[in-house]
Amino acid sequence: MTQVAPLLVLAFLAITFLQSGYDKIKDWKGNVEWLNGHFSNTVLAKQVPLALGIVLLLEIVSGVLCVSGIIQNIMQDSVIRGLGFYGAILSCITLLFLLFGQRLAKDYDGARTIVIYFIPAVLLVFWLN
């Protein structure tokens, strides 16, 4: 029988990253403008579009792997170390990138918020390993 908790966390991460990626694509200019101000006093000041593109790619791939992991686990009727595991790992890496950016910008409240997402992502890696 498929365990439900890992599937719920995979869904949580898929929704988080796919929605965030969609928002970045839909309002690229607005995101770049806001982030230019956010990172104006950091080493990323002149690299915002590149950094945003990297994060966008990480988010979309993480979300797609998480959705694929849900499908794979439902089809095989068990929680296996497959696409969901790699989605969980990439989700953790993506969140570490976001945490690094928040710390660089000295946005400590934003960094704390990232930790709220990181905890279930790490737990998912543990469950699927």
Image: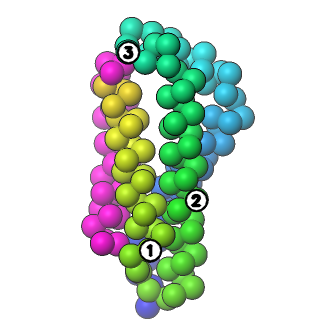
* Quarter where residue 128 is shown: bottom left
* Quarter where residue 26 is shown: top right
Task: For mark 2, give the secondary structure.
Answer: helix
Mark 1, Cα crowd under 10 Å, few <14 / some 14-19 / many 20+, is some
- Tell me the quadrant of the picture where the C terminus can be found: bottom left
Q: Mark 3 belongs to which amino acid?
A: Val
Mark 3, Cα crowd under 10 Å, few <14 / some 14-19 / many 20+, is few
- The residue drawn where x is 54% and y is 78% is 72
Color style of the picture: rainbow
In the image, 37 versus 89, the foreground residue is 89
**129 lies left or right of 73:** left
- Dominant SS of magenta comes to helix
Residue furthest right in the image: 26
* Quarter where residue 29 is shown: top right
Q: Earlier in the sequence, mark 2 or mark 3?
A: 3
Identify the residue position indicated by label 2 in the image.
Answer: 64
Identify the residue position indicated by label 1 in the image.
Answer: 82
Identify the residue position indicated by label 3 in the image.
Answer: 43
Callout in the foreground (2, 3) = 3
Q: Which residues are magenta?
A: 104-129
Which x, y percent locates residue 81?
38, 76
Between the residue at mark 2 and the residue at mark 3, the CA separation in whole angstroms equals: 30 Å
